[in-house]
């Protein structure tokens, strides 16, 4: 029995933080042997908002380096850059023709990103979910590991696949979202009421590349409450968030952690959490640095991955064109 295909992607937007790592990348690494995995650096999604060209290129390499440093094996999984496989944008245009404007207007992430006014938002940002649907559907994807904030986009991909199949005949697999419960929502250090985000400012997140000094400073300044007992209580959002991070990095149970911190204060928790994060991230940072100094190796991995991805994507696109009556 063949493995189910899982498609995952991260934007090369500069900061990949521990929320991304615990809620996504670690999940991908753990599922390597279980699924036929496709990992994409989605640079075309990144340019839906203004990017500095030099930074974008460097961040694309860094994202690929993080994939490899985290433990994704390019021999078993496909790792590539989205823009190196032209079928993504071509299929996105085709899917635009079966997408209803109202479907995109209902996308909550677009609404969130354009709260200050949608008149200046790019058409690319508005159409982002259709390109994401193309990313997914090109590869016969069965499973899409995402956070709750991306679930709506996977639902759109499902709807577009079903609509195309009903109109032109069976073409696309119908993807299912995989929502990770543990670690899917690491909250902001300075505002634990909202998900950790690079756009909220440096005090909100810990980047995978933050130095030990910066990590300690951010953790010690993290929002907590005025209580004294260290217990997992979702109503105490700041403390709960720090304990969740501690649990995910340590692998210990809630009971073990609570027992460990009996008669200890918040300052003890913060110091130990900072030490734990530094201990876990230091080896990862060294590997990232190694790959960033060996861009020729990164190029080899990405070109090989793009070739493998293009072979699958081109076949899908060929079938789509035949179904549509386009002269291929």
Image (cartoon, rainbow, N blue to C red):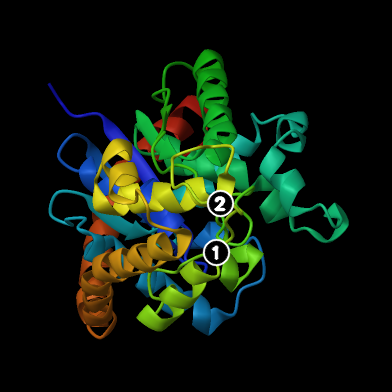
Q: Do we see residue 25 in this rendering? A: no
Residue at label 2? 238
Report the front residue among 92 and 263. 263
Asked which secondary structure carries label 1, the reply is loop
Q: Is residue 43 above or below residue 52?
A: above
Q: Is residue 237 above or below residue 290?
A: above
Mark 1 crowdedness (10 Å alpha carbons): few <14, some 14-19, many ≥20? many
Q: Do we see residue 302 in this rendering? A: yes
Quarter-wise, where is residue 119 in the image? bottom right
Q: CA distance from mark 2 to mark 1?
A: 8 Å
Pointers 2 and 1 in contact (CB under 8 A)? Answer: yes
Instruction: State the image coordinates of residue 312 (x, y, percent, origin top left).
Output: 29, 42
Residue at label 1? 222
Asked which secondary structure carries label 2, the reply is helix
Q: Give the left or right position of residue 2, taking residue 310 as reference.
A: left
Report the front residue among 142 and 97. 142
Q: Is residue 158 above or below residue 268?
A: above
N-term mark: 2 or 1: 1
Q: Residue at x 43, y 35 (%)?
A: 137
Instruction: State the image coordinates of residue 110 (x, y, percent, origin top left).
Output: 71, 46
Q: Residue at x 51, y 80 (%)?
A: 55
Instruction: State the image coordinates of residue 273 (x, y, percent, origin top left).
Output: 36, 62
Instruction: State the image coordinates of residue 283 (x, y, percent, origin top left).
Output: 21, 72
Report the front residue among 156 and 66. 66
Q: Give the left or right position of residue 295, taking residue 76 as reference.
A: right
């Amino acid at each position: 029995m063949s493995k189910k295909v899982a498609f995952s992607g991260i934007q090369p937007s500069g900061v990949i933080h521990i929320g991304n790592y615990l809620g996504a990348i670690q999940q991908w690494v753990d599922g390597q042997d279980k699924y036929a995995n496709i990992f994409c650096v989605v640079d075309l999604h990144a340019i839906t908002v203004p990017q500095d060209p030099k930074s974008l290129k460097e961040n694309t390499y860094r994202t690929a380096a993080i994939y490899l440093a985290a433990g994704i094996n390019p021999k078993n999984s496909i790792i590539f850059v989205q823009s190196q496989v032209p079928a993504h944008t071509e299929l996105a245009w085709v899917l635009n023709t079966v997408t209803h404007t109202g479907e995109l207007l209902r996308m909550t992430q677009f609404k969130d990103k354009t709260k200050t006014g949608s008149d200046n938002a790019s058409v690319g940002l508005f159409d982002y979910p259709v390109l994401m649907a193309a990313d997914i559907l090109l590869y016969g994807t069965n499973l899409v590991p995402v956070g709750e904030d991306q679930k709506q986009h996977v639902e759109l991909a499902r709807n577009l696949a079903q609509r195309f199949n009903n109109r032109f005949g069976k073409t696309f697999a119908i993807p299912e979202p995989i929502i990770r419960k543990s670690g899917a929502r690491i909250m902001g250090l300075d505002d634990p009421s909202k998900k950790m985000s690079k756009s909220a400012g440096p005090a909100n997140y810990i980047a995978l590349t933050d130095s030990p000094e910066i990590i300690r400073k951010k953790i010690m300044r993290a929002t907590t409450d005025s209580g004294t007992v260290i217990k997992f209580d979702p109503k105490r959002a700041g403390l709960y968030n720090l304990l969740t991070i501690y649990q995910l990095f340590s692998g210990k149970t809630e009971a073990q952690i609570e027992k460990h911190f009996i008669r200890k204060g918040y300052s003890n928790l913060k110091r130990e959490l900072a030490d734990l994060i530094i201990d876990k991230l230091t080896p990862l940072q060294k590997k990232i640095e190694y790959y960033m100094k060996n861009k020729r190796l990164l190029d080899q991995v990405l070109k090989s991955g793009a070739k493998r991805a293009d072979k699958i994507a081109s076949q899908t696109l060929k079938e789509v064109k035949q179904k549509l009556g386009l002269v291929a």
